[in-house]
Image (spheres, rainbow, N blue to C red):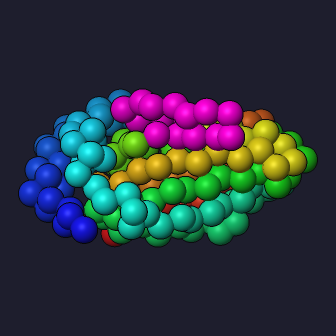
Amino acid sequence: MRKFPSSLLYAAAWAASLTLATPLPGLATTLVDNGAEIVKSTDWSKMETVTVTTSEYAYEPNQLRFKVGRPYKLVMKNVGEKDHYFTAPEFFRAVATRKAQSKDGEVKAPYFLAFEMRPKGGELEFYFVPVIPGQYPVYCTIDDHRQQGSEGTLIIE
Ligand SMILES: [Cu+2]
């Protein structure tokens, strides 16, 4: 197994601290700009799978913990009767993104903002490596779902 190059992590965290030092309206600028290198140098055979389900109106579990430098597959499954989002723009900018995937194909992008899962079994997979430690909110942006309870916390430690 190749060890995760910690120098990349430190560089990313340092760059992020510079970015965060400047207050910006709305979203911070991209935090992880060497995501492709991190994804490439990660041993994906060590990937851990974490599953979160959505329904009316909650994420289960509503708190997820990830470790810096470890590869993850996050399985997001909607077991409810309505559409639900997994919106976490700050979190998605704090990780190195490999891809998102469903049974119908996959999407590669530098980072995502939100995923939407169809009702009654809709499922998406997100492959990533956590980079910037912190606590990030996740919530559903449909109607009043968040107020009703569709929210949670994503922790990178
Ligand atoms: Cu919802």
- The x, y position of residue 157, in whole percent, is 34, 69
- The x, y position of residue 9, in whole percent, is 18, 56
Q: Is residue 131 visible?
A: yes
The part of the image, by quadrant, that contains residue 106 is top right
Q: Residue furthest right?
A: 81
Q: Is residue 76 left or right of residue 99?
A: right
Q: Is residue 71 left or right of residue 9?
A: right
- The x, y position of residue 131, in whole percent, is 29, 55
The part of the image, by quadrant, that contains residue 24 is top left
Q: Is residue 147 visible?
A: no
Count of numbered badges drawn on the protein: 0
Residue 78 drawn above or below residue 47: above
Depth check, front residue: 108 or 110: 108
Q: Which residues are magenta?
A: 99-114
Depth check, front residue: 52 or 98: 98
Q: Is residue 154 left or right of residue 148?
A: left
Residue ID at (65%, 52%): 76
Residue 108 in the magenta stretch? The answer is yes
- The x, y position of residue 1, in whole percent, is 25, 68
Residue 23 drawn above or below residue 136: above
Residue ID at (15%, 59%): 5
Residue 28 in the magenta stretch? The answer is no
Residue ID at (39%, 63%): 45
